[in-house]
Image (cartoon, helix red, strand yellow):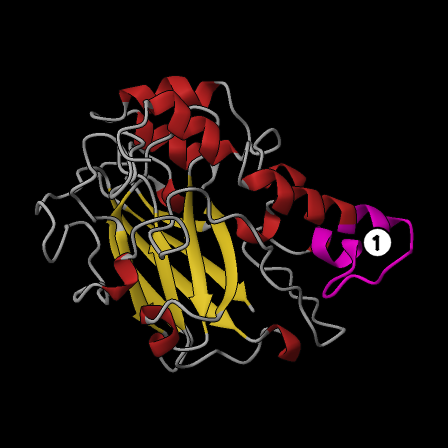
């Protein structure tokens, strides 16, 4: 896996051998539900359409909400399922994931500052009850589209990976940088939810695996800044609707954004951003 050509890396993360089984199952479930063969857990389509993109599919009237869509972890999880296991390393429990830690090369990921806040809630209770004491592991590519531990040039780094325990409100917050856009995938962040921090650091009993998506206007603002030149070209040929992961529905995975130099997350992206998402499990 280490030292693969960049195009090979991008092809795999599009799901040629990893994503397709998960996506096929999701699409089959949706088709069967549309035909009335099985019930969907969570909101009706009408309720989902009336919700805002960051509402996480809360149904309100029914008292239940849909779980976060299950997605592939891709080929670079670093959780022991495909080679290296960063979750067993001392120091992986942290807020600031911009720097490598432990016995790594000690590098720092460069880019526009990004704060990631995920709120884990109980889907069965209508998303009203926070999941206190759960754990969330996040990872994503750097400004150049490379994944630490796997991609050529950064195999000795472990930056942009970290895990935290949720607080009383079910929240975890990470300090990071805005990921680049590489060929074939919409800009995203991977995450896994565990029942507890002990489960996460032992890499057992993953509760949910999903991905966070970024709004197009924010991506364009960030990629107009120095260092993201390659992302401009890659993003131009993509859309959320054509993406291999988000194409079958991204409303409950689209982050709410604040920051930049304009109101509501617009502007030139130079001031940094905060991405928030509610994660029903």
Res 14 seen here:
yes
Q: Nearer the viewer, residue 202 or 36?
A: 202
Res 182 seen here:
no
Query: Residue 180 location in percent, x, y?
Result: 33, 33
Q: Is residue 45 magenta?
A: yes
Residue 144 as seen in the image, left or right of residue 247: left
Tell me the residue that label 1 is attached to. Answer: 33
In the rendered view, would you say 261 is above or below 65? above
Residue at position x 17%, y 44% from top?
A: 157
Residue at position x 39%, y 74% from top?
A: 199
Query: Residue 281 location in percent, x, y?
Result: 56, 69
Q: Nearer the viewer, residue 87 or 136?
A: 87
Segment tinted magenta in the rendering: 29-49
Residue at position x 17%, y 65% from top?
A: 91
Q: Secondary structure at mark 1?
A: helix
Determine which quarter of the picture holds residue 248.
top right
Category of crowding for the residue at label 1, using alpha-carbon neighbours closer than 10 angstroms: few (below 14), some (14–19), many (at least 20): few
Residue 217 as seen in the image, left or right of residue 58: left
Determine which quarter of the picture holds residue 94.
bottom left
Image quadrant in which the N terminus is located: top left
Determine which quarter of the picture holds residue 187.
top left
Q: Nearer the viewer, residue 267 or 163?
A: 163
Labels in figure, total? 1
């Amino acid at each position: 896996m280490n030292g693969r050509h960049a195009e090979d890396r991008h092809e795999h993360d599009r799901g040629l051998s990893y994503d397709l089984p998960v996506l096929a199952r999701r699409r089959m479930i949706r088709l069967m539900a549309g035909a009335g063969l099985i019930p969907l857990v969570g909101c009706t389509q009408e309720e989902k359409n009336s919700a805002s993109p960051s509402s996480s599919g809360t149904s309100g009237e029914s008292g239940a909400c849909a779980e976060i869509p299950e997605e592939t972890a891709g080929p670079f999880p670093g959780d022991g399922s495909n080679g290296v296991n960063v979750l067993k390393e001392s120091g992986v429990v942290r807020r600031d994931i911009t720097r490598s830690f432990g016995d790594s090369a000690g590098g720092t990921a460069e880019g526009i500052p990004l704060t990631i806040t995920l709120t884990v809630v109980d889907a069965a209770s209508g998303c009203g009850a926070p999941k206190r004491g759960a754990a969330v592991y996040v990872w994503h590519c750097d400004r150049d589209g490379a994944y630490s531990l796997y991609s050529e040039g950064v195999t000795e780094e472990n930056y942009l990976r970290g895990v935290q325990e949720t607080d009383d409100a079910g929240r975890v917050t990470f300090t990071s940088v805005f990921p680049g856009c590489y060929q074939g995938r919409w800009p995203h962040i991977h995450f896994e939810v565990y029942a507890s921090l002990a489960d996460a650091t032992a890499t057992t009993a993953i509760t949910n695996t999903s991905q966070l998506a970024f709004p197009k206007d924010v991506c364009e603002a960030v990629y107009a800044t120095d260092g993201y030149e390659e992302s401009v070209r890659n993003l131009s040929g993509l859309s959320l609707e054509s993406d291999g992961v988000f194409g079958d529905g991204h409303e409950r995975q689209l982050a709410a954004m604040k920051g930049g130099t304009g109101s509501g997350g617009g502007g030139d992206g130079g001031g940094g951003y905060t991405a928030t998402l509610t994660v029903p499990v």
